[in-house]
Amino acid sequence: MDKFEFLKEERHLKDTIDIINEETIKYIEKRKDVSEQILDSRKKFIEEYEDDEDRVIEYFDHERYIVEELYRTIDKRLLELVKLKEAPYFGKIGFIEDGILEEIYIGRYGLNQDHSFEPVIVDWRAPVASLFYKGMLGKTSYNTPLGEVDVEIASRRQLIIKKSKLEGYFDSDLNIQDEILQLVLSSKSGEKLKDIVTTIQKEQDEIIRADRNKVVVVNGVAGSGKTTIALHRVAYLLYNFRKQLENKVLILGPNDIFMDYISEVLPNLGERAVSNETFSSYAYKEIGLNELIKSQTLYLEEVINGNEELIKEVKYKSSEEFIDQLDKKVKDIENNYFKIRSVTFMKEEIVSEEEIKELFNKYYEYMPIFKRSQKIKRVLISKIKDRRDEEVRKINLRAKEEREKLTEEELRIQENNIEYRRRLAIRDIISEVMKSKDEISSWIENESVVDIYKDFMKVNELSYLDLAGILYLMIKLEGKKSSTEIKHIVIDEAQDFNMLQFIVLKEFTGCRSYTIVGDANQRLIRAEEVPAMLRLNELFDDLYQLFELNKSYRSTYQIMEYANKFLDENSVVPFVRKGEFDVLETSVPKDDKEDLIEVLLNLLQDYEEEEYENVAIITKDKNDLEIIAPELKKHTNIIAFKNEDIIYKGGKVIIPSYFAKGLEFDAAIIVNFDKDTDNLIKYIMATRALHRLSVINII
C-alpha cells in the first residue's frame, strides 16, 4: 500500500467518523425532544380528563401508536449510525460521468448531511453503488429510475475497517481471487448466516438488482450464496421500493431451524418488516386448521429410509395428475353438488328451478361455485323478504281498514283483538319465512372444503402434503385470498416445491414478484424429472428469469472435490478456495460403539484445538442420531437436533441431514451407518462444512 494514500484514507475515515458522531448527537437530541413533547401532551391530557377513565385509555392507545411511529425511525437510524461508526464503509469507486471524475464511498447504510447535496456514504443498495460490484474498470453503465447512465470506472478500492480503524486497502477488480474475499471465506462461521455486502460478486449483484417485477429463479450449487443473495435482494427491493413493499414481503423456508439461522441477515441490513414462514405453517394458518397434521420431517425420515408407500404418495401429490384430479373434482362440484329446488313461500313458488339455474349458470357464472352459491342464497332470501314485506303490508292494511270501519266506542272494545290478530298473522308470516329459509339452506349450504378434500382423498388424517391441495380447492371453490397483502415472495430450498405449491401461491396471494432459490442437485425427493422451479415459465410466461450459479464459495477445494464424487459428471461444482486440510475418511466396526464414540470425541477435541467453534456431527436421519447422541452427551456438551423447533445457537451439534440442509459449519463429521446411503444425501452432508470434513463409515 502507498503510504501517502493510506494516510489520506485515514484522514477521510476520521472526518467521516466525526460526521457520524455529529449525526448521532443530532438524533439523540431529536429523540429527547420527541420524548419531552409526548410527556408534556400526556400530562396536559391527564389533567384535563382525569375524571374520564375511558378518554384516558383511548388517549394512551393512540399515544402508544405515536410513540412507536416517531421512535421507530429515530431508533433505526441511531442503530445504523452505531454500526456505521464501527465500519463506515468498505468500498470506494472512482468514475467519470459527463466528463467529471466523481468518487463515492460505499457502506452498509447511507449517510447525508443536511447542508450538503453530496452523500458522505452511499448505501450499497443505491443504483450508483452497483458500479462497485461490476468487477471491472472501463466503460459501463448503471440503472436509475430515470434510465441508464453511461460512465467510465476509473478506480475501485476495497477498504478494511475494524472498530473505526483502517487496517488496509486493496486496489483491484472485484473477482474471486480478491484478497478480501479469500479472507472472508477463510473466516469462521457464526451461529447465524452473515450478510455479504463487502464481497458480493458480479453475478450475485446482477441477481440482487434484477427487475422487481420479474419471477427471479436462481438455480445455484451448494455454497453459491443463494440464500444470502435472496435476503440481500429483499433488502435492496425494500430500500428502493419501500412504499410498495414494506410489510408486504413473505419469506418461505424449509423448516424452523433454517428460518432461525437466517433470521439476523435482514436486521443487520436494516430491515425488519418481513414475514418468515415455512409453506406448511403459512398454509396451515390460512386454511384455519385446528387439527394436527403429519409433518414434513416424518415424511423425510421415511423417504430417506426407502418407505415406498410414502415415496409413492409424495410423487403423486407432486404430480400433474394430482392437479388434474383436483380440477375434475372442482368441475364435478360445479355441475353436480347443488340439488337445486324451487323456492316457495306460503305454498306458492316464488323462484323456479329454472330461474335459480340461470343464476348459477349465467348471471353469477364468473364466481367460484361456493361463493356463487352464497351470493345466490342472499338473492333468494331477498326475494323471500320482498314477499314477506308484501304480506305484512297486506296484514297492516287489513287491520287499518278494519279499524276505520268501527266507531270510536267499537274501536275501544275491539282494538286489542284487532292488534292481536295482526300480530298473530305477522308471526305466521315470520314462521313461513323461517321455513322457506330452511328449505333453501337444506340444499344450498356446502360442507367445509377440508371435509370435501378428506372425502375426496379418502383420508381421516392430513399431512403437510395435503395443505397445497386444500388451499387449491379453497381458491377454486370459495375464491379464497390471502389474509394479508403480499407484494413479493422469497422461496428458499425451492427445488423441493412442487408445481401445485407455486400455483397456489400465485393464485392465493395474487403476487407476481418472486425471488426463488434452490439447487436441482439437492432434491431429497425426486418427485419430478425436472424440478418445478425450473419450469415456472409455464406458469409466469415472460416474467420468468432464470439465473445459474455454478461456483461454490462455502467449502474448500478439498471438501468440494470429495463432495463432487456424489454428483453426475455434468453437475460437478467448481470451487474457489484452497484449504489446509484434506478430507479425513476412517472406518469403525459396526458392533464397536465404544470405538465410534472415542473417534468422535477425538475429532471434536481436534476441532476444538483448531479453534473451530461451530461443529456438526451429521447423520442420515434421526434414527442414526439416536444411536450416538445419548452416549456423546455423557462426555461433551452437544445439542441434538431431534425436532425443528430447536434453536441453533452455535457450538457443537448433532443433526440429521434434512435439518442440516442450508446450514453451514466450520467443521463437520459425517457418520455413515449405511453404505447404501443415497449419493444426494452424502452430497448434502459433505457440503455443510466450510474448512474441515471428516467421514466415519460404519462397516
Image: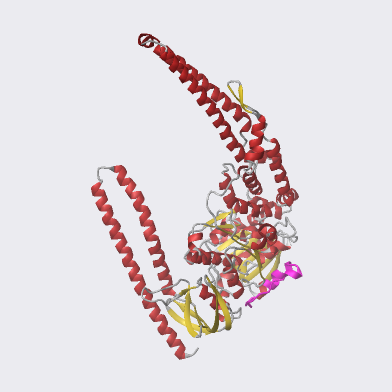
Residue 194 image offset from top left, x and y in percent: 53, 68
Nearer to us in this view, 221 or 137 = 137
Query: Quick check: 385 above or below 495?
Result: above
Query: Quick check: 450 above or below 230?
Result: above
Indicate how the structure is coloured in the image: secondary structure
Nearer to us in this view, 27 or 347 = 347
- Residue at 62% from the left image edge and 33% from the top image edge: 444
Q: From where the camera sits, is residue 620 visible?
A: no
Nearer to us in this view, 689 or 82 = 82
Q: Quadrant of the C terminus?
A: bottom right
In the image, 203: left or right of 273?
Answer: right
Residue 252: image quadrant is bottom right
Residue 691 image offset from top left, x and y in percent: 61, 72
Query: Quick check: 11 above or below 365?
Result: below
Q: From where the camera sits, is residue 77 visible?
A: yes
Residue 17 image offset from top left, x and y in percent: 39, 77
The mark total stands at 0
In the image, 475: left or right of 26?
Answer: right
Query: Quick check: 304 above or below 1?
Result: above
Magenta includes 662? no
Magenta includes 565? yes
Residue 22 image offset from top left, x and y in percent: 34, 74
Which stretch did the figure color magenta?
560-583
Nearer to us in this view, 118 or 28 = 118
In the image, 409: left or right of 257?
Answer: left
